[in-house]
Image (cartoon, helix red, strand yellow):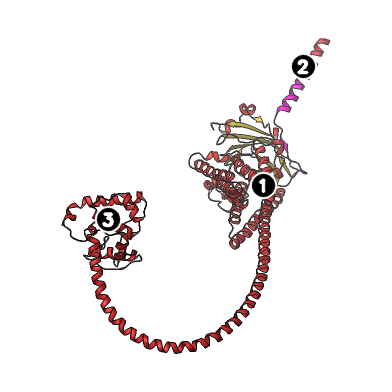
Amino acid sequence: MLNRFFNKIFLLLLAISLFSISGLMAQQPVEIQNGVAQHIFTFKEIEVLEDPSNKFIFEEIRSSKFDQKFKASATSTPQTKNLNKTYWFRIKVKPNETVEKPLILEFFDQTIDYITAYIPQADKSYNVETLGDANAFDKRLIHHKNFEIPIQNEGKETQTYYFKIRSSQIADVIIVLRTAEWFISYALDEYFYFGIFYGMILVFSFYNLIMFIAIRQKQYLYYVLYNLSVGFFEMSSDGIAYQYLWPNAPAWNQVAYAFALCATSIFALLFTRELLFVKAKAPKLNQLIVGIIAARLIFFAYCYLFDQTLFSYKFVEAIPLAVAFFTGIYIYKNGYQPARFFVLGYSFLFVGFTLKFLIMLGVSWLNFGAISYYSLSFCFVLEMVFLSFAIGDKVRLLKLKKDKAQQKIIRQMAINAKLKDTVNQELETKVEERTREVYHKSLIIESKNQALEEVNALLQKQAEEISRMNVLLEQDNEQLQTSVEKVSRDRVMNTEVDFEEFSKIYPDKESCYEFLAELKWSKGYHCRKCSSDHYFSGHILHSRRCSKCGYEESVTTYTIFHNTRIPINKAFYMIFLIYSSKGKISSHKLSELLSIRQSTCWTFGTRIKKVMDDRKKTLKKTGKNGWSQLVIE
């Protein structure tokens, strides 16, 4: 009997223990309480069931055989880590009829694409509501950036809510039970702080845009574009943009944040490059920044065109951020002072980015509320302030350099003024001395001028007589000169003369060019481009410029003298000597006669001899001036 009694006691204790354990393992319902304005579902209060193939229907999910398939969340905030896969979430709420305030369930993450909410009713049926940012904004139950569902606080039995969720990016399933009164207060405060945040972005952007218009420094423009990109990204991420800018464009809302994030990285690097003079102070880092910008654009284009799910990997922005941060540290270590504010600003941004990244990786203890959720926005504000300080510091240093340069110019101008005064005094003294000297000499010159006037009168009479005789002599000289030139030219063309005598016929460049012009255009001028017969003098000596097409032909073009470096009169004489000797004169002899290097004489002589060889038949028929047949090509 005693053994039976102890066995029964043992079985009773075992049953109580098993019941207690099963109670601990079961999902914990959240009871609505009067003193609690809001409650965030965490850990065992929210259960998850993955449905990768999206094959389960709600009737199956709510059936008893699926009770054990739901698993309690292992973290404070469960996430949909498998992109575009279906997840089922379940929460339990215990009504409390003593609470008379209306209640709502709110999804804090406004980036979730699809939410199908199954809301229990008093008759144990379920009302289905469709939410998510893949739907038009005006279809939401409450027009707020987050997703809200009004719930009923009726009955005494625990009510189970089911949510079917699917998203193209990692989403935080933060479900909050709030009173409508608390929600309104919270929403007003949140929108107020949003107004301050975006207002600061607009104020900073407008101020720097004015500075860009006034100063025309690209750093201000890049800073404005960077701030606007940050604001655009934040608005796309927190749902403000979807609510106010494009409420009827859900497709665009899915990728808008990616455009903003790409623009933020690019303009941040461009701003870094411009503000810190990276191109001059760190050429290798400048090349790295340009490469990162190109790679970021290529990655964005690939994601947009081929696989938009890659947009969810926002951690790639750590690369441009790290490059900009390292560049600021490097430039600051090299002594550029404005970089200190740049480094400080990016330090805050780096901390915020790291915090968000760790939360995304599942470090749940960091996700402790609104402060951590909006930490990146707070860090953006701090970074924006310190970057403005960096720009101001840069302008201050430039102003100091300008002031020093102006002071140096003023000092130099003072020195120049002293030198000018000293030089002027010396000049005045010398001018006075020179004036006295000139005055005394002018008296002497005046007396001598009187004597010269008398002599000039006598010389004038003699000059008149000489002029009459000169007229007669000029007539005789003209006739004589013509005869001498003709005889000399004929002699030069047919006999062996030296260079001195040859130079009397062609003494200079102008006489040679004049002879070439008469020889080249002896049959009239014809433009080689358009065959026009009309011309006027060109810019080069004895050249001719076509009056129709403007083509200018120099006198040496299309002659054997084209592009030769030998003085033209010596080149004339060389042709004459080679022609006269029938090509038998050596380059050494030519070098001796003309005082030109032997190699030059050999080169030009070879060219002349080739032309003589090509024109043997023509040269046999020529009389005097036969050497001139070698000139024109």
Type of amino acid at the residue the image marks with label 2: Leu
Of residues 370 and 624, the one nearer the viewer is 624
In the structure shown, which secondary structural element does the residue marked by tag 1 occupy? loop
Q: Which residue is mark 2?
A: 11
Judged from this view, the residue extending furthest toward the left is: 621
Identify the image quadrant of residue 205. bottom right
Is 29 inside the magenta-drawn segment?
Answer: yes
What's the distance in space between the residues labelled 3 and 1, CA to CA? Answer: 74 Å
Query: Could you say where residue 606 lies in the image, as x and y percent from the top left?
Result: 29, 49
Q: Which residue is mark 3?
A: 577
Type of amino acid at the residue the image marks with label 3: Leu
Of residues 10 and 450, the one nearer the viewer is 450
Identify the image quadrant of residue 532. bottom left
**Nearest to N terminus: mark 3 or mark 2:** 2
Q: Quadrant of the N terminus?
A: top right
Residue at 61% over, 36% down: 80
Residue 620 image label: none
The answer to whether residue 471 is visible is yes
Q: Give the answer, above or below, for where 459 lies relative to 535.
A: below
* Classed neighbour count for the residue bearing mark 1: other residues with Cα under 10 Å, few (<14), some (14–19), many (≥20): few
What's the distance in space between the residues labelled 3 and 2, CA to CA? Answer: 141 Å
Q: Which residue is mark 1?
A: 334
Q: Give the answer, above or below, for where 73 lies relative to 318.
A: above
Which stretch appears magenta?
15-37
Side of 531 where 447 appears, left or right: right
Q: How many marks?
A: 3
Q: Nearer the viewer, mark 3 or mark 1?
A: 3
Query: Could you say where residue 498 lies in the image, as x and y percent from the top left?
Result: 30, 59
